Structure formats: structure tokens, C-alpha cells
Image (cartoon, rainbow, N blue to C red):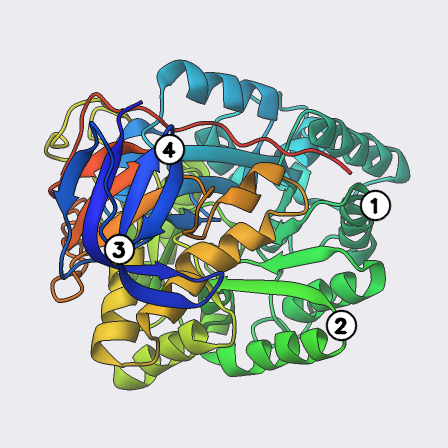
């Protein structure tokens, strides 16, 4: 592998708290040396004076699972993108498919709670495709409470996936919000016993549904406290909406009590999911102050006109990706809620990135620049640059060192217990993986919008994965596929 010497940059290591001017030597996919005036025979020398050099961003919540989507994420500084909230099933097939196709950045998968339940309760055979996970959203059978025999069957299926290297268990509890809470506890008990994290899209919080079996955030906190396992609360901004201060308070109290509970957020006031999701039923929208017109189909740009049209789309195409406008990005009060979720102590940045779709139904391509007509959520292309712009450049809430803690170091530490290879990720020191990002601190920003969602971020000048450039001079290296599958190991 080529030797690379990054010269004169502001080098940040969030593990040690180091922030200094230094050179970084890369050899054999690792950081070989960090210091002043380094020399290395035959190394390619790159002047990064005035730029920031840090560990590449680790995204715990990405659904792109494609070359096209990963390239957009690489342009946003991501070097590892993991499908953990939803997961895939079977993981053996998911890893094999990704490896066969090639990936520009690292990848990995949790075991899919939703797909395991659907196999047992609905008789749907899992095929390790995220599109299939979206398609089941309109099927009420898998959303029902399990019989004891069914529970035993799908929990056993998940345990087998952990044996096959799943990175944890992804739990879409919010998509089956009326199931017996004892089922959620059973999954977290399995995870704690196996020494792996769970990643939960929590069920409805009490403010949105007073009849919920249990408040979603309280449920996650209780599971973390009861079993001592690691419970990760996904996208607290979107599941809490305007009640984010209360739910963050629940998480803070759980942590003070010793619960191993982590939390993530992304800096957008609109989410994206399949339109067949239970919480997007017309009768459920008023609980969040939403109407059908707050839903926009990603592929066509159609804004849903009324409840009748919403019912029709949910019936005919429940897996259709849609934008859900739950907060107003332009409203100062709503924007302050998003910023508070980002500023919450040890809150992790994660994108919830969605795949890119084209009018012909395709969701991937090796072409770059991407062919015209592709659509997705802007968070796919801009989550990390947008977070840096908001929290470092504009608000001054984070130092650059803190930004790398939130985007690189803390997410990598979530994975330490299950995946030993993460010990060398998320920091920048001798022996660390050479998954690195070089940023222009004065220019970094997002450009993707809801109407032009595939515009790459700017100011992310170079991205290396295992010492190989996947982004160079702010453009994709089209023949670079150094991404590797990261597999779990049960303790």
C-alpha cells in the first residue's frame, strides 16, 4: 500500500485530547507516526497546512447500503457507515453482498428485530435488503404481540445472527408500538447476556400517545438499568419532536443511575421513513401536530394532499420513502430544539442516511458524478458537515476537538464491546487505522437540500479509508473500494 505523508495540518486526536500542528505518516493502512518534520522515503507528500486532520466519522445509523450512498457519505467525511437501527437479516448474506459489490467505506450490520419478527409472525423470508424492511411496514401481522412460541422462535433467530457476527440488535420498536413491553425486555436481556448493544427506534412517547404501553424513552432506560447492557437511543430529535428536553432528561437520569445509555441525533427538522409506518397513519398524525401535507414522497416530490390520498399510498406502496416534516428548520424555536439535542452531553452525531432512488427504480450506480434525477433525504449527503457548520462555526458550542469526539470517538466506543476492530478507530495516534478526514475549517458546510438532496458537502478535502484515498481534492476516487465489513464477536 502507498505511503502517504500529510504535512503541517492541525491534527486532532479526541482520545487523548491532543490538538496540535503535526505531520501524519500513513503506512500499510495504519497511522505510523505523528510529529513535526517527519520524513519518509517514497512517501507521497501532501501539504495540509491550515487544514484540520482527524479520525474519519463513524456513522452508527446509515441505511444507504450502496456504492452511490456511501460516496455521498464519504464526501461528508464518513469512513465507516453502519446499519444498526433497522439491521439486516441474515447478516451473513448482507456482508457477502456488500463485499462482492465493493464499498468505498467500511460497513457493518446489526441483527434485524423487525425482519426476525416478520419471518415468524408474517411468514416473510428475509433477504438482507433494506427495501424489504420498508415493505413490511404496512403489514399488521408482524406488529402484533407474539405468542410465547413465536417469541422463543424469533429471539432464537436473533441469537443465531449474533453468532454469525451481527454487531448488535436493531429494534424498530416504534414501528410496532402496541406490542407487549416484555418482548422488548427479552431482546435486551439476550443482548446483555451476549455482550452486544441494542439500537432502538423507541416506541411512541407518552406525549404523543397517552395510551402507549410504556413511554418509549422510559422503556429504553428501564432496559438499560435492569440488565446492565448497552442501550443506544436512536435519533432522539425525531422521536421526541418538541418534547426533546423531557426525553433528554430521562436519559440523563438513567445515566446518573449507572445505566449504559447512549444517544444520537441529526441536525434536520424532517425525517424520512416508509410511508406505511404505524405512526404515519392519518389518525395518528394529529398527536404530533401534523397533517398529511407534512408528508412528501421522496421519489416523486408529491406532497400528500389529504387523508384519503395518504390511505391510498399506504395501501398500494407502504415502503415508499417519504419526508416527514416534524419540525420547521426555519423556525428559531424548533432550530433551538435541534441544537439542544446536538449539545446534550456526549450526544453522538448519526445520519439516518437513506439510499438514493432514481425514477427507473434503481438505488445504486458506480457512475460519478451521480446521474441526474436521484433523490434521497439531504441528511445522506450533509449530516456531518451541517453539524460542524451549526455547532462549531456558527454557534461555537463545540470546539473542533469536541466535534471529533461526537462524530468519531464516541460512536466508535459504542462498538468496542462487540467488535474488537473498533479499538483502532475513532482516534488518531500511532497504530490507529488510517481512516482519516482532512477538513477546511473555514469552508466546510452542507449543500444538500430537500429539493436538491444529492449535492455533496464542501470543505471535506480528503478522506482516506485504510490509508487509501476515497475522496481527494473534494472529489470521489472512482476506482477506490477499500471499505471492509466489520463483524461482531460475542464475548
Residue corresponding to mark 4: 466
Of the pair 298 and 351, the residue shown nearer to us: 351
Q: Closer to the N terminus: mark 3 or mark 4? A: 3
How far apart are the alpha carbons under marks 4 and 1? 32 Å
Q: Closer to the N terminus: mark 3 or mark 2? A: 3
Q: Spot the residue most to the top.
A: 100
Q: Closer to the N terminus: mark 3 or mark 1? A: 3
**Label disc, if present, on residue 85 of the rendered structure:** none
User: Residue 14's quadrant in the figure?
Assistant: bottom left
Q: Is any atom of residue 257 visible in this view? A: yes
List x then y, in percent, for residue 134: 47, 37
**Secondary structure of residue under mark 1:** helix
Residue corresponding to mark 1: 193
How far apart are the alpha carbons under marks 1 and 2? 18 Å
Residue corresponding to mark 2: 258
User: Residue 282's quadrant in the figure?
Assistant: bottom left
**Label disc, if present, on residue 36 of the rendered structure:** 3
Counting other residues with Cα less than 10 Å from the Cα at mark 4, is it few (<14), some (14-19), or many (20 or more)?
A: many
Residue at image point 38% right, 31% down? 29
Q: Closer to the N terminus: mark 4 or mark 2? A: 2
How far apart are the alpha carbons under marks 4 and 2? 36 Å
List x then y, in percent, for residue 170: 61, 44
Residue at image point 31% right, 24% down? 481
Amino acid at each position: 500500500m502507498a505511503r502517504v505523508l500529510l504535512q503541517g495540518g492541525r491534527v486532532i486526536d479526541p482520545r487523548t485530547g491532543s490538538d496540535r500542528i503535526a505531520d501524519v505518516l500513513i503506512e500499510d493502512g495504519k497511522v505510523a507516526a505523528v510529529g513535526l518534520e517527519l520524513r519518509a522515503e517514497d512517501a507521497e507528500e501532501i501539504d495540509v497546512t491550515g487544514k484540520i486532520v482527524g479520525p474519519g466519522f463513524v456513522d452508527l445509523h446509515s441505511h444507504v447500503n450502496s456504492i452511490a450512498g456511501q460516496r455521498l457519505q464519504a464526501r461528508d467525511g464518513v469512513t465507516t457507515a453502519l446499519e444498526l437501527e433497522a439491521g439486516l437479516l441474515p447478516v451473513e448474506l448482507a456482508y457477502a453482498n456488500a463485499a462482492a459489490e465493493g464499498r468505498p467505506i467500511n460497513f457493518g450490520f446489526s441483527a434485524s428485530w423487525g425482519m426476525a419478527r416478520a419471518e415468524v409472525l408474517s411468514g416473510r423470508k428475509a433477504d438482507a435488503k433494506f427495501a424489504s424492511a420498508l415493505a413490511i411496514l404496512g403489514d399488521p401481522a408482524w406488529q402484533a404481540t407474539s405468542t410465547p412460541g413465536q417469541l422463543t422462535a424469533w429471539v432464537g433467530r436473533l441469537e443465531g445472527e449474533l453468532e454469525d457476527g451481527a454487531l448488535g440488535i436493531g429494534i424498530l420498536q416504534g414501528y410496532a408500538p402496541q406490542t407487549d413491553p416484555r418482548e422488548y425486555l427479552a431482546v435486551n436481556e439476550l443482548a446483555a447476556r451476549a455482550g452486544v448493544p441494542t439500537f432502538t427506534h423507541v416506541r411512541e412517547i407518552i406525549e404523543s400517545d397517552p395510551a402507549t404501553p410504556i413511554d418509549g424513552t422510559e422503556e429504553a432506560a428501564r432496559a438499560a438499568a435492569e440488565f446492565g447492557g448497552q442501550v443506544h437511543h436512536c435519533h432522539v430529535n425525531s422521536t421526541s419532536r418538541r418534547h426533546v428536553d423531557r426525553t433528554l432528561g430521562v436519559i440523563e437520569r438513567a445515566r446518573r443511575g449507572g445505566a449504559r445509555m447512549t444517544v444520537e441525533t441529526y441536525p434536520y427538522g424532517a425525517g424520512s421513513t416508509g410511508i406505511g409506518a404505524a405512526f404515519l397513519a392519518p389518525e395518528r398524525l394529529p398527536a404530533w401536530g401534523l397533517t398529511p401535507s407534512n408528508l412528501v414522497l421522496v421519489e416523486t416530490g408529491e406532497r400528500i394532499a389529504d387523508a384519503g390520498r395518504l390511505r391510498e399510498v399506504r395501501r398500494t406502496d407502504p415502503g415508499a420513502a417519504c419526508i416527514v416534516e416534524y419540525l420547521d428548520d426555519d423556525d428559531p424555536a424548533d432550530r433551538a430544539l435541534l441544537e439542544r439535542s446536538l449539545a446534550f452531553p456526549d450526544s453522538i452525531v448519526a445520519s439516518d442516511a437513506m439510499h438514493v432512488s432514481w425514477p427507473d427504480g434503481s438505488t445504486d450506480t458506480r457512475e460519478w458524478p451521480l446521474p441526474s434525477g436521484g433523490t434521497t433525504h439531504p441528511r445522506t449527503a450533509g449530516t456531518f458537515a451541517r453539524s460542524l457548520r451549526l455547532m462549531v462555526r456558527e454557534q461555537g458550542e463545540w470546539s473542533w476537538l469536541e466535534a471529533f469526539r461526537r462524530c468519531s470517538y464516541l460512536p466508535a466506543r459504542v462498538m468496542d464491546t462487540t467488535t474488537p476492530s473498533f479499538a483502532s478507530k475513532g482516534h488518531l495516534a500511532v497504530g490507529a487505522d488510517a481512516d482519516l478526514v482532512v477538513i477546511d475549517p473555514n469552508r466546510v458546510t452542507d449543500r444538500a437540500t430537500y429539493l436538491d438532496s444529492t449535492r455533496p458537502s464542501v470543505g471535506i478535502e480528503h478522506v482516506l479509508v485504510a490509508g487509501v484515498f476515497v475522496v481527494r481534492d473534494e472529489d470521489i476516487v472512482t476506482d477506490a473500494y477499500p471499505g471492509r465489513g466489520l463483524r461482531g464477536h460475542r464475548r
